[in-house]
Image: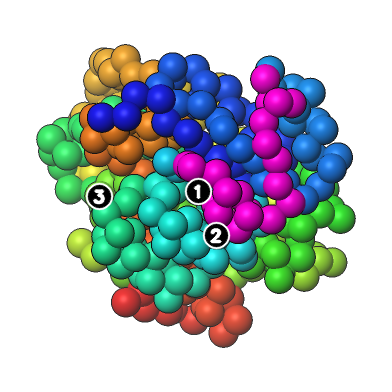
Amino acid sequence: MKENLRIGFIGAGGIAQGHYQRLMATGKAKVAALTEPSRVSLRRFCRNCEGAENLPSYRDYKEMLKREPLDGVVILSPHTVHYSQINDALESGIHVLTEKPMVCTIQHAKALIRKAEKCGRVLMISYQRHYDPMFRYMRSQIGKGAIGEVQFVQAVLCQEWLRLTRNTWRQVPSLSGGGQLNDSGSHLVDILMWVTAMKVREVSALQMNFDTDVDINAALTLRFENGAIGNLSIIGNAPAWYEDHTIVGSKGAFYLRQGIGLTQQDARGRCVSVKAPKYAGNPDSNFVEAIQGKAQPETPAVCGLRVIEVTEAAWKSAAKGGRPVTVD
């Protein structure tokens, strides 16, 4: 078993710094090479990441894959190029951790899942909420039947996304694939299904673009396979970040509120003591352990498929004035 994995970065923008620090902190992997076409981004990355200035850097990721003996790559590029980059890495026999969303079409998601299985390589998405003790606690409790059958879910994400992403690739459809729903909103689409272990069956959606080419605000009504219903609100023109989650079951409920924490109630509304597990994992450390065969991926590629299934359905529904669209 290889104990010192060589990891390459495809993209070295602001989000790459956290990935670099978490990978290096494992003591079992090191960042061995970088691909970054922007000299400004590359200089900033090297300035903020100790030792990065000595790494070989490339402008073309294909050249890096060809020249560097890598065990894995972390993909940190605009959304619409994820598919080709993941595919090329898997073709080269390299494990992949990608930033969200995994891809921007259902067809691409299914193709990559088949490719990873055929190649026998790890393919993961960096959905960090899977590693958060509160979300892990709710998932475990729901799995044990603590709140009975889940009947309603709700999640809200408010963010100053419209303002902060102005004049960046995130508001260019050919690079982003869509707006905030496809970007930070994909975290909430994912976590609703992961925590409850329920698949979305039908989506009705309305969206607002304001003066941009992508969706900024999105309001989704969801129906799950077990008959549960729910709401998902992604608000991109808010003044600041705010997030909350509600899960109501036949025997209790969870209320996770920003700045307050997690409240659990039983069937009669009495508060239940919350004992969240001690857990310090993250997508990068899990990626390393998954490559080494020491752990299963906590954010497997199937999560990326489930997210784009809901996202595509929402786009189609919004284009039809909110008419329901079935998720196959």
**Residue behind mark 3:** 197
Q: What span is colored magenta in the figure?
A: 51-70
Please state which of the two labelled residues, at mark 2 or mark 3, is closer to the viewer: 2
| Residue found at x 48% / y 42% | 69
| Residue found at x 60% / y 58% | 62
Quarter location, residue 295? top left
Q: Quadrant of the C terminus?
A: bottom left
Marks 2,1: beta carbons within 8 A: yes
In the rendered image, residue 226, in percent from the top left (x then y), is placed at 20, 62
Q: Which mark is residue 85?
A: 2
What is the residue that sits farthest to the left in this orientation?
144
The local crowd at label 2, few if under 14, some if 14 to 19, many if 20 or more residues have their Cα within 10 Å, is some
Q: Element under label 2? A: helix
Which amino acid type corresponds to the residue marked 1 in the rendered image? Thr
51, 188: nearer the viewer: 51
What's the distance in space between the residues labelled 2 and 3, CA to CA? 29 Å
In the rendered image, residue 159, in percent from the top left (x then y), is placed at 68, 43
Please state which of the two labelled residues, at mark 1 or mark 3, is closer to the viewer: 1
What is the residue that sits farthest to the bottom in this orientation?
320
In the rendered image, residue 286, in percent from the top left (x then y), is placed at 36, 32
Marks 1,3: beta carbons within 8 A: no
- Which comes before the other along the chain, label 1 or label 3? 1
What's the distance in space between the residues labelled 2 and 1, CA to CA? 10 Å
Q: Element under label 3? A: loop
Q: Which mark is residue 98?
A: 1
